[in-house]
Amino acid sequence: MSGFPTLLYKEVLRFWKVSTQTIGAPVLTAVLFLFIFSHVMEGRIRIYDAVPYAAFLVPGLVMMSVLQNAFANSSSSLVQSKMTGNIIFVLLPPLAYWEFFAAYVLAAAARGMVVGAAVLLVTLPFVEIEFRRPLWIIAFAFSASAVLGSLGMIAGIWAEKIDQVAAFQNFFIMPLTFLSGVFYSIHSLPAFWQGISHFNPFFYMIDGFRYGFFGVSDVNPFRSLAVVTAFLGVVSAITLTMLKSGYRLRH
């Protein structure tokens, strides 16, 4: 049973050793988004009656950072290991495929939640934030980061080079994230685009996460949690199937 914690420790240490790049840079990006959008939109738009736009924006930026960094952690680790050839040192030990999966996903979730917590802490001096449902905050942060960790594994297993992972992120992860309500409420959209947004699983992650702060949301938080949990089950099943078959790993 020492294989799983060792692999998990290795993956956590991997991003922690370069924390300036893996934690500091995403925090700076999120803070810049906050300053720019709050400066432009504050006073011109109010999403919920009692919530200023800057406060509304913070949970969205936190969750966006969680999602993008969880995906980046597992996808970059796998594709770099494949390119350098050191993936063999992970495949040779007697690790079950579910241990392989759990170590990478938990490390991705750790990075996503650490970055999210750092973004939240940095923004607190500038914006007054409430924490009405802290358990909902934790539940959505962990489940969403696990989903993106699994998606990152799928991308890392499928990709043969960095360019393919970048394409997966730029044409799939990034659009779904930006169109999920990070900067706006879907109720400000025309009816057609509101309907389209309900097919975006990232929308439920961000809306449920925001509910934990303000106690209000665009959809019922139980529905959001159910959608996120179901999506996690689907992507986890796909990832575990790929690992069990050795797809693009055991050439």
Image: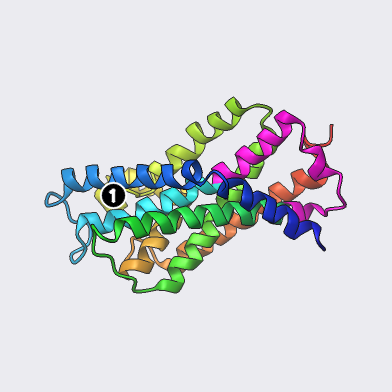
Disc 1 residue type (three-letter): Tyr
Which residue is at a point 46% across and 53% down the rendered structure image?
A: 115
Is residue 204 visible in the rendered image? The answer is no
Magenta span includes 84: yes
Residue in view at x 73 percent, y 53 percent: 7
Residue 85: give x, y in percent of width and height.
77, 31
Image quadrant where one finds the N terminus: bottom right
Give me the residue at 36% from left, 62% from top. 210
Judged left or right of residue 72, residue 115 is: left
Instruction: Return the x and y of residue 165 as percentages of the image width and height.
Output: 59, 32
Residue 160 appears in view: yes
Q: Which residue is mark 1?
A: 184
Q: Determine the residue located farthest toward the left in the rendered image.
A: 43
Magenta-colored span: 71-100
* Residue count near mark 1 (Cα–Cα under 10 Å), binned few <14, some 14–19, many ≥20: some
Magenta: main secondary structure: helix
